[in-house]
Amino acid sequence: MITSVAIQGIKGSFHHIVSQQYFDKTVAIVECLSFDKAVDSLLHDESDAVIMAIENSIVGSIIPNYALIDNHQLHIVGEHYLDIQHHLMALPNQNIDAIKEVYSHPMALLQCKEFFKKHPHIKLIEDKDTAEVAQRIHQQQLKAVAAIGSELASELFELKIIAKSIQTIKHNETRFVIVKRTNSEFDEKEINKASIKFELEHKRGSLASVLNVLSDCKINLTKIQSLPKIETPWKYAFFVDVTFDDYKDFQKAKSIIQIMAEDLKILGEYKNSRL
């Protein structure tokens, strides 16, 4: 049973919102200002699970988090998709003309860059966490400073939303994974999605052969991400997400890929949250 979950950020962050939606509001939150620290809390039994953003519909994969899961032998036990709405917020009784500086996470600034082109008087400054900036504005009563964050953050830190949904692409979705030290959440009959990792020899057709196996076994490829192996130039590891209707089809595909590829690793078997 999960009673505590580590998140990157503080209460009011998008990771906090995911914790409330995936689990419930009674789960204890372990606040961490980096994904590395969140993983450390799991490894040192300070939390039961970690919520980790893994990809965004606008900016793509969050590659360092794939490496964290792989390097620490962790397991994905679930996923959650969250519609990300970025709001500009500041202390009450201010409008956007009064704002001189906006502090936020680099990814949030990137997703909102077209909005700020219309307000060139505002200086954009990268910071560690969106919700932490909102908290700082509230605690220090910082005028002429704004944060980018969730509606929950504005409520928790008593800030006024002065511009709603300022992200460039209005449908902005992030996929989060729930990570634990073990992978035994579901019965095989309930599993219809998996995340795997494998390595291939650097030769023509090697990846195509694996993809053909997936197709022949009735496996649907939903995501593929390559990462270079730093210690072996021009050799790559592939992180792949697949879905399937019958777990036996996935078992068959695993047994074949085990022969064809190097270092096949199952990063997680879980329920497809899109269904």
Image: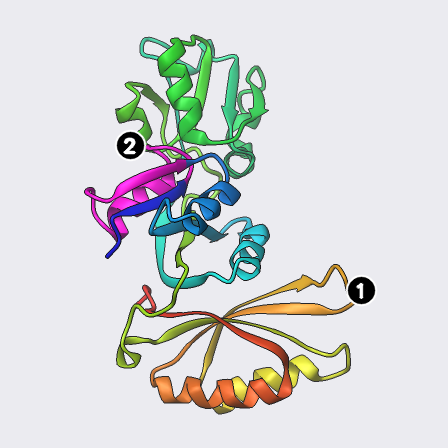
User: Which residue has dot 1 on it?
Assistant: 233
User: Which residue has dot 2 on it?
Assistant: 152
Rounded to the nearest angstrom, the CA distance separating label 2 from label 1 is: 45 Å
- Residue 206: x and y in percent read 69, 83
Q: Is residue 88 left or right of residue 110?
A: left
In front here: 11 or 121?
11
In front here: 216 or 30?
30
Closer to the chain start, of discs 2 and 1, is 2
Region in magenta: 8-31
Circle 1 SS class: loop
Q: Per the image, is 135 magenta?
A: no
Q: Per the image, is 15 magenta?
A: yes
Picture quadrant where residue 270 is located: bottom left
Residue at 30% x, 21% y: name it: 157
- Residue 185: x and y in percent read 30, 68
Q: Is residue 263 visible?
A: yes
Q: Is residue 85 visible?
A: no
